């Protein structure tokens, strides 16, 4: 149990810098409206491409950042799903460290990344098209936010003339450092609790039992792997990758589990209780895509 606690702390600490930078970015976008214009790239035509490419970077923080940007309506639904489907957690590191020949490693990793990028990109564009490309109104980004939490004050117009230099510096410190830090710490605490809970679950269930569960018949594997991949903890991607390296599951099964493994992104989304229907919809889309790709990939590989 001590190892689970340490792992949860380390995973949370790795995520904290991403969250801090993200909240600083959000504060800048809200209070420095002249910087808001470049944000068009985050919800423009090329946004799913950026999302899918970003997701391939083996860091769990990007799915959390995407969830927060989506929550603040800065990226489209398709871009969010592109990041989630393409997200690579520790699985790539497991594959790189495996005893497989380097040629085999290169082929497996390249094929896996190609599948995740292509699927994330395709589903992202399809989802944006199906939802009539529900973009963020640019007008929202160009309007300053005059209130930010309790005790917030206006930043524009004549009131600025009455602000002392010290008051401005204090305000900047609060908006661009203290507030992002507090938000990041709050989310980090939530992430730590989730990591510890699911880490404990894996410990109690036993990694060998999870691997045995994954070793179901070939035509059940994608379904099982996709379900395990939905568990918001890096242990799920590690177990899936390790089981593949040991020869316990097929390549398509691994792809299915890693497609649904969006890290802690869904955890952040489900913090918004009011949007639970939309979140469940996105959850089922991600799960369905993972299962479908897993079955198709296994079927194709059987032909060779």
Image (spheres, helix red, strand yellow):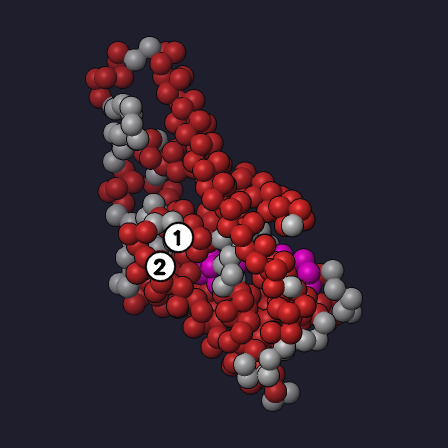
Q: Position of residue 223 (x, y in %)?
A: 51, 76
Q: Is residue 83 magenta?
A: yes
Whole-percent x, y for residue 42 in the image: 39, 50
Query: How far is mark 2 from mark 1, CA to CA?
Result: 7 Å
- Measured from the top left, where is residue 67 in percent x and y? 42, 51
Q: Give the camera-side residue of 21 and 250.
A: 250
Residue appearing at x 55%, y 55% in the figure: 198
Graded by Cα atoms within 10 Å as few (under 14), some (14 to 19) or many (20 or more), the crowding at tag 1 reads many
Q: Secondary structure at mark 2?
A: helix
Q: Is residue 54 above or below residue 283?
A: above
Q: Is residue 158 visible?
A: yes
Q: Which disc is residue 54 wearing?
A: none
Residue at x 28%, y 57% (from the top left corner): 134
Q: Are marks 2 and 1 in contact (CB under 8 Å)?
A: yes
Quarter assignment of residue 301: bottom right
| Dominant secondary structure, magenta | helix
| In this rendering, position of residue 17 left or right of residue 208 | left
Say which mark, if any, is on residue 269: 1
Name the residue: 61% across, 60% down.
204
Indicate which disc residue 279 carries.
Answer: 2
Q: Earlier in the sequence, mark 2 or mark 1?
A: 1
Q: Is residue 237 above or below residue 10?
A: below
Q: Farthest residue in the left direction?
A: 158
Residue 50 in percent (x, y) is at 46, 55
Q: Secondary structure at mark 1?
A: helix
Q: Which residues are magenta?
A: 82-95
Left or right position of 221 against 207:
left
């Amino acid at each position: 149990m001590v190892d689970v606690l340490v792992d949860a702390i380390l995973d949370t600490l790795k995520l904290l810098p991403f969250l801090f930078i993200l909240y600083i970015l959000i504060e800048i976008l809200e209070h420095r409206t002249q910087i808001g214009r470049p944000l068009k790239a985050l919800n423009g035509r090329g946004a799913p491409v950026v999302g899918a490419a970003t997701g391939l970077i083996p860091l769990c923080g990007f799915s959390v950042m995407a969830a927060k940007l989506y929550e603040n309506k800065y990226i489209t639904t398709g871009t969010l799903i592109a990041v989630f489907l393409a997200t690579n957690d520790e699985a790539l590191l497991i594959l790189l460290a495996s005893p497989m020949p380097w040629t085999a490693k290169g082929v497996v990793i390249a094929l896996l990344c190609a599948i995740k990028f292509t699927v994330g990109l395709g589903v992202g564009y399809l989802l944006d098209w199906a939802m009539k490309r529900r973009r963020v109104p640019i007008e929202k980004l160009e309007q300053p936010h005059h209130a930010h939490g309790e005790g917030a004050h206006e930043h524009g117009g004549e009131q600025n003339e009455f602000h002392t230099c010290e008051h401005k510096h204090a305000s900047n410190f609060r908006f661009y450092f203290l507030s992002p830090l507090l938000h990041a710490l709050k989310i980090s605490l939530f992430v730590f609790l989730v990591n510890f809970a699911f880490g404990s679950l894996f410990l109690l269930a036993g990694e060998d039992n999870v691997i045995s569960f994954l070793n179901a018949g070939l035509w059940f594997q994608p379904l099982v792997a996709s379900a395990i991949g939905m568990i918001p903890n890096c242990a799920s991607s590690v177990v899936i990758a390790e089981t593949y390296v040991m020869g316990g599951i097929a390549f398509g099964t691994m792809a299915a589990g890693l497609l649904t493994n969006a890290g802690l992104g869904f955890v952040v989304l489900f913090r918004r209780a009011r949007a639970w229907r939309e979140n469940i919809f996105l959850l089922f889309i991600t799960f369905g895509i993972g299962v479908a790709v897993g079955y198709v990939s296994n079927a194709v590989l059987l032909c060779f």
